[in-house]
Image (cartoon, rainbow, N blue to C red):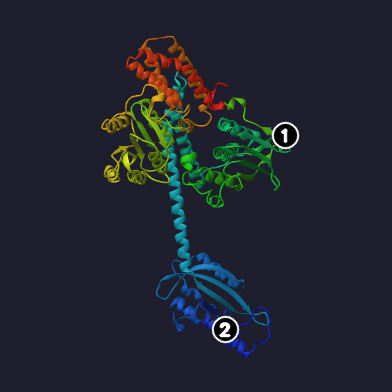
Amino acid sequence: MSRSNPSSLTTSRPQAPSPAPFRDALAAAVAAAPTGIVVSDPNQPDCPIVYANPAFFRITGYRPEEVIGRNCRFLQGAGTDPAHVHAIRRAIAERRSLDIELVNYRRDGTRFVNELHISPVFGPDGALRHFFGIQHDVTAREKLARANQRARRQAERASAEKSDFLAFMSHEIRTPMNGVMGTVSLLLDTALDAEQRAYAETARRCGETLLSTVNEMLDLSRIEAGRLSLEAIPFDLAKPVTEVLDLLGPAAAEKGLRLSASIDPTLPARVVGDPQRLRQVLLNLADNAVKFTSAGGVGIRVERAEAEGRIRFAVADTGIGIAPEVQRRLFQRFAQGAADTARRFGGSGLGLMICKQLVGLMGGKVALTSTPGKGSVFAFDIALDPVAESGRPPATLLPTPEAIAARVPAGARGRILLAEDGEANQLVAAAILRKAGYAVDLARDGEEAVGAARTAAYDLVLMDVRMPRMDGFAATAAIRAMPGAAGRVPILAMTASAMAGDREKCIAAGMDGHLPKPMDRAGLLAAVAEVLDARPRRPRALAPEEEPHGAPTLLDHTTLGELRSAVGPGRLPRLIGVFAEETRARLARLAATTDLMAIEEEAHGLKSAAGTFGAAALRETAAALEAACVAGEARTALALRDTLPALVERSLAAYPVRLSGSG
């Protein structure tokens, strides 16, 4: 048999001689193969190569006369791992197959990664005849693998650096924020009137939101960097559920929602797991449910899962539901249901992403079923080991009792349209302007601003530049296109962009001025006064029925909703109660005096507080009373004062029962 003819090789099983055409086809296939194929003879000294196909010569760059008769070690070099060489020698000595990758070198000295498969070939008599070697040049694959590995290491380093940075920044942010929050808490413990308390509550709410966002980003960064570890401690199964109910009880009660939880009584009372992270997931899901539900209820169910040893948690609501196209992207970072979701309902868009990651760390997966207009159910099941002989949990849970607690007409100084999508900014700016004697209407985006400017007469428009649906520039263009006085109303831009050229850009868009954020009280009032002082004044009205825009309604629900959003869920009822007590005390002081200076002082305070709490008619009457005192018109002032008690009671009664605090 010729040692250079691969068609003469046989496998380990004795076979009948192949027909000549088959041998010729086999030889042709070996010669045409794109991978390197060599045959070596272990029965000759040093096991030389006796055959190599053309692909082998293309891969290595050697000529046939430089290969045949040589041991394959000539392909090895300085970068070849000795362990790989030893593995090849051992496989040949033991007459067995081997798959291995090793570094080889071409004739020109360049290295390549050889994916080598060697197999022994036995004759019909069982004697070892040859070793058959198949070689693949996988250098490109190895380079790609190394590049991917480097990229992965770089990504891991970047993730670690990001986590370190966020940890540092969260500390740097939280340290002063703790001071701010602590100071606000101390302020809330002092004697404040209703208006002051509303502002302090707003500051606390904004601080809590900022801290929550910082904590969410830090949690997500730790999860992605693999630095967040779960506890495995015994805890009461009902405890994290109860804590969630108590935290969300005020918000649910304020919206008139049923909030409850049920636990399968066959479950153990105590389990082993991470109660803090379980509570975090449930709170996030239930908070979203309350936020997006306006009628009906929110329920948490805890029950046995189908898989042995796992417990299923589900949060169901009767809210607005989620469209199928939104569901597909809902668990991505910063993803929210619609473009205006953050503006309308708040949130960073990180909550569900963190829930997904935390549940994944606990060995589960969050599932969602939802029908638009009918509600949603978020559910997951995780393994929680039972604590032996711990009893049974309560079957039903409720929040503890302790946990439940139209436009304004033109004013004396002018009527202003405030177009601003940030609710906290709305509250602050509107309160400053109303306290200064201006009547303020609100628009939450450019489209609302255009609609308001088309249907009402304003002395000034304060226009935020960046708003959803229609930005300030487009809204200004639409207003300027209106006929008559509506299209000529002065417009001041409000923007956090204070770079060179921003003012010119606003002027070019048709605005009359540029007011950079953040706005301080003096700067805001000065800018407004500068515009309004250049316009003809409307006559001051002494009684609300004389106002050119008609009698005000008892409550301005826009202002009330704005205040509710700013101070946070569950806090408005108490503030309304403080306002009611303070107003009745003010009435008593007014009834006890006829001194115009004393009446003016009380009227001024009542006007400001009523404006803050959306008591529109009361604010206008108080403003008229203040104006009469300033003008020295005692008879008009006393007549207006005598109308206040009935108006106060009607105004307080107009608040929803759960807000009025008056029973």
Horizontal side of 528 relative to 581 (left or right) equals left
Amino acid under disc 1: Arg
Dot 1, crowdedness within 10 Å: few (<14), some or many (≥20)? some
Quadrant of the snapshot with the N terminus: bottom right
Quarter of the image for residue 286 reads top right
Where residue 547 appears, as percent x and y from the top left, is 38, 27
Observer-nearest of 659 and 378: 659
Secondary structure type for disc 1: loop
Observer-nearest of 340 and 1: 340
Instruction: From this view, report whether residue 609 is shown above or below residue 363.
Output: above
Q: Is residue 559 visible?
A: yes
Residue at (43% x, 53% y) in the render: 154
Horizontal side of 142 relative to 96 (left or right) equals left
Dot 2, crowdedness within 10 Å: few (<14), some or many (≥20)? many
Quarter of the image for residue 628 reads top left
Instruction: From this view, report whether residue 95 is shown above or below residue 235.
Output: below
Secondary structure type for disc 2: helix
Where residue 326 appears, as percent x and y from the top left, is 53, 50
